[in-house]
Image (cartoon, rainbow, N blue to C red):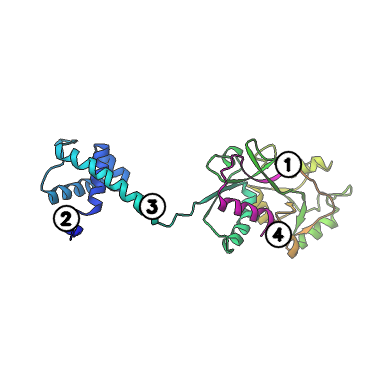
Amino acid sequence: MSTFRKTLPPLDSLIFFQHVAKHGSFSKAAKDLFVTQAAASKRVQRLEDWLGTQLFDRNGRRITLNSAGKTLAADVELALEFLERSVAKVKTPEEPVIRIAAVSSISMFWLYDRIKQFSLSEHACHVNISSSDDMSKLTDEENDLAIVYSNGTPSGWVGNQVLSGDLAPAAPPGIAQEAIEAGAFTQNWDLERSPPLLEYTNLTPDWINWAIWLKRMKLPSIEELKHIQCASYGQSVGRSLTGHGILLANLELQKPELASGRLVRIGDLQLTPRKSYYLCYKNNGMLSPAARTLFDFLVTGS
């Protein structure tokens, strides 16, 4: 009966030897195996000690396989490949990570909550979310799904509209009442008495902020009104909720706050942008079953 523990060296020493033999370098093998050069050298030295023979000719930092090393390297390569295939036959397949990229405001106010619901469902799987307002990053080939702000799905992608993005003034009840009393967003607007608008930077021409909204509605310009500059749409929401001013609210993104009464619409004016939000995937037939399940969940909510 063969007792492998007595007749074979430790498996990891053979793995280290195979990497060093392949690269012809301790430093390159160490980098490949995420260890130090000293650790790689020590493992190979232990294998040579176990065998009682040298496997490399060493000349300073240069190493080359000797005849014994070449003989062993060929067989070890085949043995490790065979062992890898054998293990793969019985190993439970790893679930792939689904990569979804989304516009930052969508991630914050819409996507994270839905991913939480998905993670608690029977369909849960590993999901990686990245946020960006750069279309090229959203439609990177590495992403399985993307939520973009556009006139439709980007070239080479297919999908569904998930949000229209209607924009209207909103604020906490107290601020909203002050705005109404000042005739905000009407022809009788008392600009001095009106609470400040919470403006945010228009990072791309597609975005609509207060400056653009007011112009489209033929109302006084942002320069004529009291306003507070915010770093992002998300920050403008936060400052509005804490009583600092009037938010230009995306009515669908802020639906929870509007439904609970934390935010109140001011007046009836609203603007429907030409562009909206689309959940999409690459049109190449390679969408995995798990990614398809997540896509359907985000579209239908169940």
| Amino acid type, callout 1 | Lys
**Real-space Cα distance between discs 3 and 4?**
59 Å
Q: Which residues are magenta?
A: 275-302
Q: Is residue 170 left or right of residue 149?
A: right
Q: Nearer the viewer, mark 3 or mark 4?
A: 3
Secondary structure, mark 2, is helix
Q: Earlier in the sequence, mark 2 or mark 1?
A: 2
The residue under label 2 is 7
| Amino acid type, callout 2 | Thr
Q: Quadrant of the N terminus?
A: bottom left
Q: Is residue 289 magenta?
A: yes
- Give the camera-side residue of 43 and 135: 43
Q: Is residue 213 left or right of residue 295?
A: right
Residue at x 62% of width, y 36% of height: 156
The residue under label 3 is 88
Q: Nearer the viewer, mark 1 or mark 4?
A: 1
* Extreme residue in the front direction: 1
Residue 135: give x, y in percent of width and height.
61, 39
Q: Earlier in the sequence, mark 3 or mark 1?
A: 3
**Real-space Cα distance between discs 2 and 1?**
70 Å
Secondary structure, mark 3, is helix
Residue at x 20% of width, y 45% of height: 41
Secondary structure, mark 1, is loop
Q: Mark 3 near mark 4, Cβ–Cβ under 8 Å? A: no
The residue under label 1 is 275
- Give the camera-side residue of 131 and 231: 131
